[in-house]
Image (cartoon, rainbow, N blue to C red):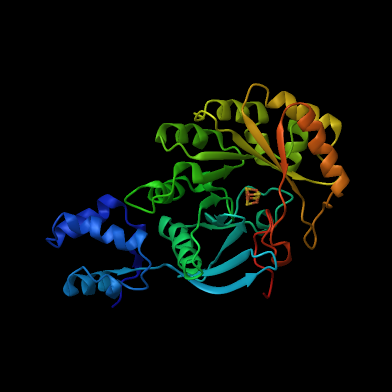
């Protein structure tokens, strides 16, 4: 019987133990990790510098991939949305976003999400399950293979797809370690971003990990009343506490925190909102990304006009806050922020 467990779901220690039990030499682990994370192979049989009997043993014991691509949509702006099927039939989505010399992959960490943000289609779907580290990594590996076939390299990885990465702490962190490790995929820490709604205990824990990741906070409102309305988690972890946790996160010199801010018509872009935001981030190095809301069927919010977004940006900039308007890439394929859920029947 073929292995039913993804080899990438094993920790390094577990894999080392498995190899030792088989009497494999110590260097085998490095060889294997090289194939798993730095080469693009479709099967264990392609790992040509490993002995044949060992490749067969791997084949018997493990799966190389736990996800399989089942659909993809490409938008006119070059954004590609991938739909993967997990072994249990759950669907996982990733979005590849080209932007000049950058190629950013947005990965999911959960199927569905527990956070229930009102402006988010994924939030409405509810929570189904956590992804494993192997499933998170497979999104990067499978899309990287596709990108390389087009002679491109993924330059940035953002944990901003379906789910709250810190709500799946153990698996997200295990995947992140592989992403930034030289033994793994070798991404620079600066090119890997984790976005959170502000789960304070996990943010504090993240400080201890010494990973130096770029942290983004999904802010969306600068006063507790509005934020609790938009994001139920704010009732548990109010803004002042979230900001205190952010201030405690070690920020490398010349780096800034990213604050993501979905602009909802008539809800969070008044001069008063700008004043609150300015006060909230006082003394903190931040940049604000404004994301005009993308309405979806049944959404209770509307998209703000371009003028409204520009005004909000101007108010913040006038108060010294770097503020950018993020183009919603791939809107045609529902791949824009907060819309990361495959269209029904697509
Ligand atoms: S915005 Fe992010 S955290 Fe909020 S419900 Fe959607 S996926 Fe979850």
Quadrant where the C terminus sits is bottom right
Depicted 36 relative to depicted 236: above or below: below
Check the image and report above or below for 293 versus 149. above
Q: Nearer the viewer, residue 255 or 15?
A: 255
Of residues 131 and 37, the one drawn nearer to the viewer in this rendering? 37
**Count of picture labels:** 0
Q: Quadrant of the N terminus?
A: bottom left
Which residue appears at 61% of the width and 58% of the height? 97
Horizontal and vertical percent position of residue 42? 37, 73
Considering every residue shown, the one lying at the far top of the view is 283
Residue 263 in percent (x, y) is at: 78, 45
Q: Quadrant of residue 290?
A: top right
Q: Is residue 98 above or below residue 215?
A: below
Question: Is 275 on the left-hand or right-hand side of 22?
Answer: right
Decide which of 154, 265 is in the foreground and name it. 154
Percent position (x, y) of residue 123? 66, 53
Q: Quadrant of residue 94?
A: bottom right
Q: Residue at x 63, y 35 (%)?
A: 236
Residue at position x 67%, y 49% in the image: 116
What residue appears at the point 59 percent right and 72 percent down from the top-left corner?
72
Q: Position of residue 178 (x, y in %)?
A: 38, 50
Residue lying furthest bottom in this view? 1
């Amino acid at each position: 019987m073929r292995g039913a467990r993804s080899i990438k779901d094993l920790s390094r220690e577990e894999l080392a133990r498995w190899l030792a039990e088989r009497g494999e030499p110590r260097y085998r682990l490095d060889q294997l990790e090289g194939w798993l994370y730095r080469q693009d192979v479709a099967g264990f049989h392609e790992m040509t510098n490993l002995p044949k009997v060992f490749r067969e043993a791997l084949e018997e014991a493990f799966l190389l991939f736990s996800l399989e691509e089942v659909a993809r949509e490409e938008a006119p702006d070059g954004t590609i949305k991938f739909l993967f099927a997990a072994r249990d039939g759950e669907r996982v989505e990733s979005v590849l976003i080209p932007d000049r010399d950058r190629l950013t992959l947005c990965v999911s960490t959960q199927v569905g999400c527990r956070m229930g943000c009102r402006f988010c289609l994924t939030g409405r779907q509810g929570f189904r399950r956590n992804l494993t580290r192997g499933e998170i990594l497979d999104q990067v590996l499978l899309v990287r293979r596709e990108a390389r076939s087009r002679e491109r390299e993924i330059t940035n990885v953002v944990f901003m797809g379906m789910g709250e990465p810190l709500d799946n702490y153990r698996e997200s962190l295990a995947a992140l370690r592989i992403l930034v490790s030289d033994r793994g995929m070798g991404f620079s820490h600066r090119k890997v971003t984790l976005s959170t709604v502000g789960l304070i205990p996990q943010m504090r824990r993240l400080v201890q990990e010494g990973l130096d990741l770029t942290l983004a906070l999904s802010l969306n409102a600068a006063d507790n009343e509005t934020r609790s309305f938009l994001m139920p988690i704010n009732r548990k972890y109010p803004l002042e506490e979230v900001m205190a946790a952010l201030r405690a996160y070690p920020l490398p010199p010349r780096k800034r925190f990213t604050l993501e801010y979905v602009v909802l018509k008539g809800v969070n872009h008044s001069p008063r909102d700008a004043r609150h935001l300015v006060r909230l981030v006082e003394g903190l190095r931040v940049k604000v990304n404004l994301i005009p809301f993308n309405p979806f069927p049944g959404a209770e919010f509307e998209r703000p006009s371009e003028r409204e977004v520009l005004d909000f940006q101007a108010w913040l900039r006038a108060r010294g806050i770097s503020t950018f308007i993020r183009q919603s890439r791939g809107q045609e394929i529902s791949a824009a922020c907060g819309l990361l859920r495959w269209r029904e029947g697509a």
